[in-house]
């Protein structure tokens, strides 16, 4: 186990082989990586464990650079384990380069069916037994999708948990993918309206960019086309605390004047690609809708629910907006089939994505009956009008989990854990201890 020292922390790496399919424990194995972090000078054996489940799906755990942010607050009281969820980071990777080793698209889709919250939780259980022994219990901190995983953990193995802290990640227990997006699109429109109220000059700038993209073929530095739909997908950033400002600075100087007239600058295109590319997290695109699949809700596939539901919200039609001299609205946290044509990191996985979208009868991820009898201390930060996770769905779930306490706030957006310098985590820790 490699051990490293950084300013204020001691870091230990752990790698554990786990079954690809936990229903076949003697079958194929994959690796799961986790990074243990302890405050320098503290005895780790005297500290309780706190497992951090990252947002996503498909994002690796944070890479510590010393003692800062929410991690610094966690290290006051815990021995922290940063998990690279299966398929991400230093765990056995799943991307356009590795998935062809599985075989054809059908084999790849079958493989990726084992990369949802149910498998992640079972990986955690093997890690817990490996690090703590069969009788050990640990705490869980789940951010966004990590909170979804934490609720799955409470459903599957509550006896393993000392306490659960959730930030922006209480899922609807029995909502369909269509329910998710019918609730999401109005929130996205509100975020657009707030952005244009803050930066009214961006209305004309965005219209000029979309008009240019409609009239010209524009390629991003990685070779993928920047279409109007792809440009609209930059709205994903509107759900973070600084996202509206970042979007404004992106579009304010998008054009430069070349020999043939105005063109989108290399700087703009490079920044846009950084926000739009799934090269660093392809599982986000492949599994974003399957994380909502549950056979008790629907025995059909998710079938590109975001794309189908978007047609019910004509305000997102960029062509109509240009023709009507109206603002062009950005989309948000939605994945669409055209992304597997415009993004070079996803294009080789287009057929695999289609098979996942059509896959039916996903196993249930939550057990409402068990959650109703929960006896694990649970606290959750619910962000008012969270663009990524519906507040109404979150509060309904909060009422369905026995003993769960919520902190509902508009002080932070969805990224409150990351940007609050430990204040969000500190409040949750005090809540779970009964100090608030």
Image: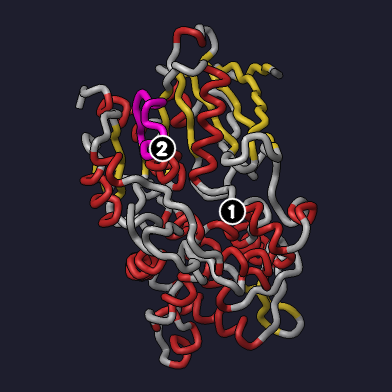
**What residue is shown at x 25% (from left), y 28% (from top)?**
431
Quadrant in the rendering for residue 293: bottom left
**In the image, residue 164 lies in the stretch drawn in magenta:** yes
Can residue 419 be seen from the camera position used here? no
Quadrant in the rendering for residue 86: top right
**What residue is shown at x 46% (from left), y 20% (from top)?**
49
Could you tell me which secondary element the residue under label 2 belongs to? helix
Is 49 situated left or right of 105 in this image?
left
Q: Which residue is mark 2?
A: 156
**What residue is shown at x 43% (from left), y 60% (from top)?**
238
Neighbourhood count class around disc 2 (C-alpha, 10 Å): few under 14, some 14–19, many 20 upward: some
Residues rendered magenta in the picture:
154-165
Neighbourhood count class around disc 1 (C-alpha, 10 Å): few under 14, some 14–19, many 20 upward: some
Q: Nearer the viewer, residue 122 or 9?
A: 122
Q: Which residue is mark 1?
A: 113
- Residue 337: % across, % down: 59, 72
């Amino acid at each position: 186990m490699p051990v490293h020292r950084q300013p204020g922390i001691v870091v230990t790496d752990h790698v554990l082989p786990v079954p690809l399919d936990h229903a076949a424990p003697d079958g194929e194995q994959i690796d799961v990586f986790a990074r243990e972090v302890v405050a320098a000078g503290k005895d780790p054996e005297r500290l309780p464990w706190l497992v951090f489940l990252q947002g996503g799906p498909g994002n690796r755990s944070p890479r510590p650079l010393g003692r800062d942010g929410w991690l610094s607050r966690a290290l006051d009281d815990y021995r922290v384990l940063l998990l690279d969820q299966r398929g991400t980071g230093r765990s056995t990777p799943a991307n356009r380069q590795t998935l062809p080793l599985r075989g054809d698209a059908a084999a790849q889709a079958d493989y990726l069916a084992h990369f949802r919250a149910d498998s992640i939780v079972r990986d955690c259980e093997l890690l817990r037994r490996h690090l703590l022994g069969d009788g050990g219990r640990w705490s869980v901190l789940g951010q966004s999708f990590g909170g979804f995983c934490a609720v799955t953990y409470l459903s599957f193995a509550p006896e393993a948990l000392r306490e659960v802290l959730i930030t922006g990640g209480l899922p609807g227990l029995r909502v369909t993918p269509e329910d998710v997006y019918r609730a999401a699109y109005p929130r996205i429109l509100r975020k657009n309206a707030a952005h244009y109220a803050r930066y009214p000059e961006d209305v004309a700038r965005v219209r000029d960019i979309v008009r240019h993209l409609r009239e010209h073929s524009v390629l991003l530095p990685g070779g993928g086309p920047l279409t109007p739909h792809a440009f609209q997908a930059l709205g994903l950033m509107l759900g973070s605390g600084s996202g509206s400002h970042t979007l404004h600075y992106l579009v304010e100087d998008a054009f430069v004047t070349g020999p043939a007239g105005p063109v989108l600058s290399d700087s703009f295109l490079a920044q846009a690609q950084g926000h739009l590319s799934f090269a660093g997290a392809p599982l986000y695109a492949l599994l974003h809708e399957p994380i909502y699949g549950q056979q008790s809700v629907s025995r059909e596939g998710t079938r590109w629910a975001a794309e189908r539901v978007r047609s019910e919200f004509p305000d997102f039609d960029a062509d109509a907006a240009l023709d009507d001299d109206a603002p062009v609205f950005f989309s948000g946290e939605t994945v669409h089939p055209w992304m597997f044509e415009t993004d070079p990191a996803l294009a080789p996985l287009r057929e695999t994505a289609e098979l996942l979208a059509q896959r039916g009868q996903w196993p249930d991820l939550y057990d409402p009956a068990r959650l109703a009898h929960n006896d694990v201390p649970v606290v959750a930060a619910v962000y008012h009008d969270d663009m990524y996770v519906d507040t109404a769905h979150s509060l309904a779930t909060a009422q369905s989990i026995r003993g769960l306490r919520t902190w509902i706030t508009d002080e932070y957006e969805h990224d409150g854990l990351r940007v609050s310098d430990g204040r969000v985590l500190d409040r949750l820790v005090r809540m779970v201890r009964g100090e608030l």
